[in-house]
Amino acid sequence: MDSHAGFHSLHGETAASVPIRGDLPPWLRGSLIRNGPGAFSFPNGSDVDHWFDGLAMLYRFTFDPGDRAGSGSAGDGDAVHYRNRFLRTDAYEAATSGEFEGGFATGETTLRSRLSTFLAEPYDNANIVAERIGDEYVALTESPRGVRFDPNTLATTGHVDREGDAPSGQLSCAHFKRDPATGALVTVDTEFGRTSRYHVTAWTRDGDRRHVGSVDTDRPAYMHSFALTPRYVVLTEFPLRLDPRRFLKPGRQPPFIEQFEWEPERGTRIVVLDRTTGDVVAEPTAGPLFGFHHVNAFERDGGTEVVFDLETVPDATAIDSLYLKNVRAGEMGTMAGRIERFTVDLGSATGADRYGGGDAAVTRESLYDGGSALPTASPARWCRPHRYVYAMGMDTPVTEWARRIIKVDAETDNVETFDDGGDYFGEPLFVPAPDGDAEDDGVVVTVALNVDADRSRLLVLDGETLDERARATLPHALPFDFHGRYFPEIRASASE
């Protein structure tokens, strides 16, 4: 393979039990479901221009340490039940028939298609992440239209729209945030209009939606994620902004993301919204920056400070660097991020000065500036102080994909590294041991691409040391995907 390894199309769909080399902890019996672009072109079909527009493919890895009643340990004979499958969406049907008109960064749009997308059936190429909403498993993207799937077969079973009285919009943060204490799943949607608004809503454990609060904005920002604490929702309104009136102009226009403009003079507005009252309690401004992924957030000093970790880049040119013509040529120079910690001093937290920020203030410090991508924290620490951040490690300046996994200690600045088992690595996810004492007591699961073998491997690493515990070689080479979730309740069935 050339430097474009990982940006290939995978058309085959497979189900197989893959043997494990090494040992799985006996408690690791759930399923990792990953989501990402599976194909960028189809025979006699359509091509896409950007990594973000690849057609959604789900990957399921179900861990099966084997039947060892009474043994208390796992070893030879362990297996991973693997399956991959495209989501059968409207976008998939259009792409396979050669009628794909455009997506996030592909193709031009007409006024008619823009109105249809906003008013009728939003874009459904849900290729970013998988979540559980109530009893349903849903693939998500940046439109308010999720795609429901069967967690065992990965078969597409329908759409999940924003139903009920709670407001929605035309754009959604792809990453929902779950409060582990209440089970609530919080979302942020953007509604375009004369006065545009960010709507914060929450799904209950039963899958019902309620309105938390809304925030006005004159020109909506592109936001891929947000931060959550027990009391607050935190929006980082980057200066990549959009005038919604552009969508109503006649004629053909560039793809969606190219409608946004970089306006660094605005800075980055940090909006802190109270989850109980729906009021904005603080909105200080930081310097101009851009980012996709919030790691985690928590409160400090009796709730007078809100702390969140965010992976940042200086500006929005990171999006341009991910056009397929660039990444396949190894031109990824703006992609590496740095992990920063932001602290918002809420001040008097009256929320009275809209766009004024009151006496609230925000400061930032670097946790890791050696090059990172797709950072995560333990789900056991969501909405609570965390010490460790796991991420893909990138060289700077970037000329190729991630060559290692890193573990950043936010307290000591120590960095652990793993760089074996493959040439290129994907997002690392920490799975906490059910009865673990330490924050890093568990395992890290990631997918690595072995270029020479033209195969990908699932790797299970020790959460404390990043030493390899187990690996499984998959039937094919997976394209670079986006995000995964570990679902402990999805177990191996007799039909595997």
Image (spheres, rainbow, N blue to C red):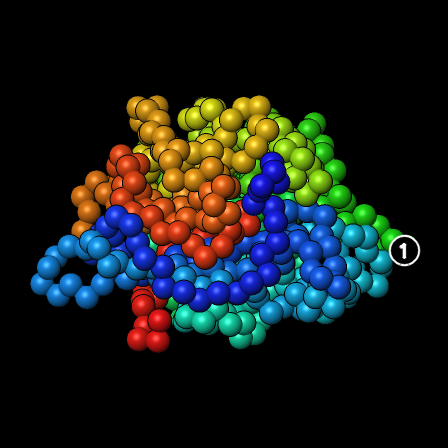
Number of callouts: 1
- The residue shown at (40%, 46%) is 446
Viewer-proximal residue among 116 and 79: 79
Label 1 sits on residue: 250
User: Seen in the image, is 417 located left or right of residue 273?
Assistant: left
Residue 403 lies, in percent from the top left, at: 47, 33
Residue 315 placement (x, y as % from top left): 64, 30
Pick out the residue farthest to the front: 452
Q: In the rendered view, does 6 fall on the left or right side of 327?
A: left
Hey, what amino acid is under mark 1?
Pro
Residue extending furthest toward the right: 251
Q: Which image quarter: residue 62?
A: bottom left
Instruction: Tell me if I can see residue 341 in this picture.
Output: yes
State the image coordinates of residue 198 (x, y, percent, origin top left). Answer: 61, 51
Quadrant hosting residue 18: bottom left
Q: Residue at x 84, y 63 (%)?
A: 112
Tell me if I can see residue 204 in this picture. no
Left or right, 194 with respect to 76, comes to: right
On the image, the x and y values in percent for residue 76 come to 22, 55
| Crowding near the residue tagged with mark 1, few <14, some 14–19, many ≥20 C-alpha atoms within 10 Å | few
* Disc 1, SS: loop
Where 311 sits versus 448, above or below?
above
Instruction: Look at the image and tell me in which quarter the C terminus lies.
Output: bottom left
**Image point 55% across, 54% down: which residue?**
36
Residue in view at x 61 percent, y 54 percent:
9
Does residue 116 appear to the left or right of 90 in the view shown? right
Instruction: Name the quadrant of the N terminus.
Output: top right
